[in-house]
Amino acid sequence: MITLFGRRAAAFVLGATVLLVACAGNGGPSAPAEPNVARAATTTTSPVSLALRLCNGKKPKRIGTIKDPAIVEASGVVQSRRHPGVLWVHNDSGDTARVFAITKKGVALRQYTLTGAGAVDWEDIAISAGSNGAPDTLYLGDIGDNNSVRNNINVYAIPEPDPAHDTSAAAPQVEPLLYPDGAHNAEAMFVDPASRDLFIVTKEFSGDSRVYRKQGGLLSGQPTLSLVANLSLGGGELVTAGDISPDGSAIVLRTYGAVFVWSRKPGEDIATAFTRPPCHAPSPAEQQGEAISIDPNGLGYVTTSEGVHAPIRHVNAG
């Protein structure tokens, strides 16, 4: 039996229940509707470093052929940063002191003689940004020494010519450089865009290359290089070329069968960057690969080889 009080209580409970249901259905405060919008992700990801993107690069693709018959042993290449699509290359030992401007397809543009310069064994070419509107600087490394007998090596520097207009190059600056521990054979060279220090990496059959620095660029300080890093790349990994990205965040060294890439943190010196293990980027199969250059925009790198009408290849970054 339900008493009058019990009937009233039941009616009250039933009414409250109906009210709650109605509020829920109408978006009332006791049961707010879930808005139909996408939620922002609560996790963040760091941008992939240039070094990692290079190591995740695509299969090397042939993009051109060196057409100038005077380029018989391309031993160094660097991409112009002010003149899009222009490659600067030079021959190995046995040529005169000259540098060639070609397109990425290998079409000859101009060649420039470095008046007064010697050419014992040119092995690599590097570039650094100009300041206050000045042209960029090209560095030609007469650093080869197969028998390790040279008393000194030479690096020549010229303002980068404009192949569209300039018919001759300015007189080169040169400074004889000395190793602190005797003669070495080297084929890789690059200039740090942050410090403008010049770096030379030796070529060793053991794969234990040494990294030397000329602080402050040419014609500054002492001519004696300083040893800043030791690399263990593995037996038979002879370093034949090197480059650094325009922002300084990636360093590449190539051998006849591999491409090694080191990442570099902002504000970090080159020596510290070399203490980390490198990653491995795609390596093209070339007759005698002794040249590599990172794209100015960081989207990949270019390689070429010694030999007449050598192919030019490009690796797209991942």
Image (cartoon, rainbow, N blue to C red):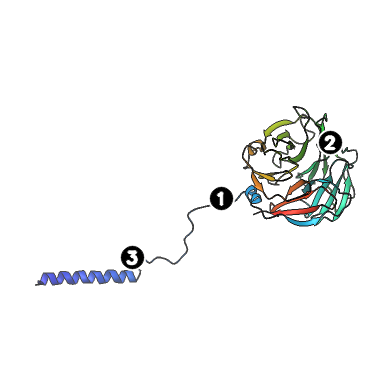
Res 66 seen here: yes
Relative to 64, residue 31 above or below: below
The answer to whether residue 275 is left or right of residue 138 is left
| Element assignment for label 1 | loop
Residue at left 62%, top 40%?
277
**Could you say which quadrant of the image residue 256 lies in?**
top right
Q: Is residue 248 visible?
A: no
CA neighbours of label 3 inside 10 A, class few (<14), some (14 to 19), many (20+): few
For mark 2, give the secondary structure. strand
Residue 57, above or below 32:
above
Residue 145: where, in percent of width, then height? 81, 34
From the image, tell me which residue sits under label 1.
46
Circles 1 and 3 in contact, beta carbons < 8 Å = no
**Residue 31 marker:** 3
Q: Which labelled disc corresponds to residue 2? A: none
Q: Which residue is mark 2?
A: 174
What whole-number distance in Å separates the C-alpha atoms at marks 1 and 2? 43 Å
Using the numbered discs, state the Cα–Cα distance from disc 1 to disc 3 in whole angstroms: 39 Å
The amino acid type, in three-letter code, at marker 1 is Ser
Q: Amino acid at mark 2?
A: Val
**Residue type highlighted by circle 3:** Ala
Dot 2 surroundings within 10 Å: few (below 14), some, or many (20 or more)?
A: some
For residue 133, side relative to residue 235 (left or right): right
In terms of image quadrants, where is residue 104? bottom right
First along the sequence among labels 1 and 2: 1
Residue 39 point in image, percent of width and height: 47, 61
Q: How many marks?
A: 3
Image quarter where the N terminus lies is bottom left
Q: In the displayed structure, does residue 19 sit left or right of residue 176?
A: left
Few, some or many residues within 10 Å of mark 1 (<14, 14–19, 20+): few
- Give the position of the C terminus as an image quadrant: bottom right
Q: Nearer the viewer, mark 1 or mark 3?
A: 1
